[in-house]
Image: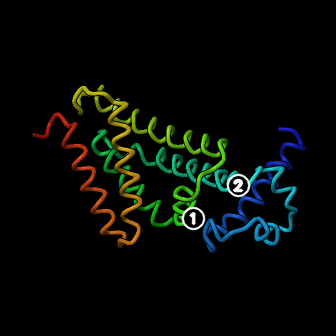
Amino acid sequence: MNKKQLQTEQTKRRLAEASKALFAQKGYKATSIEDIVTATGSSKGNIYYHFKSKEGLFLYLIDEWNREWEESWASNEHLYQTCTEKIYGLMEQLVLDDMNHPLTKAADEFFTGEKKENDIEERIDQILKHHIQFNRQLVQQGIENGEFKTDHAARLAIILESTIIGLSQLSRDLEPEEALTLYRQAADVFLHGISRGLK
């Protein structure tokens, strides 16, 4: 990375960090580009140069959140001996991450809000596909090691992601322990359908 690229990346990170605090405090819809200009001391033009739009800036933060989540998962995955344990571990990490991440409420607003521009919709679709691919690899690993029934891993990955999305939306007002119990029970239901060892 040359000096100019490094400066550009540093500027993006500075803008993103200041914006993250605003989105966490005010929510997605209530945070305007003018708020971001005031908080960062940057111009609208500079923000648009780096992110194209408020939506693009927020998706940059979502990408960072996903990277952090994956790093956390990678550092803990070795704690689980089986794919069944990994699915329970996945549910636990999702609950703890969702309940504690500063952008959770803003992300709810963003993803359930008005229709987005085509390029933003495409990026959202890529995020969803990435999550489904993660699930598919996990299910496929369980099939290959004989833990799960031989089945269509791609379909099961979509079912698992749909369950996670639904749980995320419907457990927002629960206490963390109650949400964790709900996620674990959802894992029980999912695993009951695919496990070789359960009747």
Position of residue 185 measured from the top left corner of the image (x, y, whole percent) = 24, 56
Which quadrant of the figure contains the N terminus? top right
Colour basis: rainbow
Among numbered discs 2 and 1, the one appearing first in the sequence: 2
Q: Foreground residue, 58 or 84?
A: 58
Position of residue 128 measured from the top left corner of the image (x, y, whole percent) = 50, 42
Position of residue 138 measured from the top left corner of the image (x, y, whole percent) = 37, 36
Check disc 2 and report its element: helix, strand or loop: helix
Label 1 sits on residue: 106
Q: Residues within 10 Å of mark 1 (few under 14, many from 20)?
A: many
- Residue at image coords 61%, 40%: 122
Q: Is residue 108 above or below residue 190?
A: below
Type of amino acid at the residue the image marks with label 1: Ala
Check disc 1 and report its element: helix, strand or loop: helix
Q: How many marks?
A: 2
- Contact flag, marks 2 and 1 (Cβ < 8 Å): no
- Residue at image coords 52%, 51%: 69
Q: Is residue 29 above or below residue 185?
A: below
Label 2 sits on residue: 57
Q: Does residue 49 appear left or right of residue 63 in this picture?
A: right
- Residue at image coords 30%, 33%: 142
Q: Foreground residue, 139 or 89?
A: 139
Q: Residues within 10 Å of mark 2 (few under 14, many from 20)?
A: many
Which quadrant of the figure contains the C terminus? top left
- Residue at image coords 63%, 73%: 26
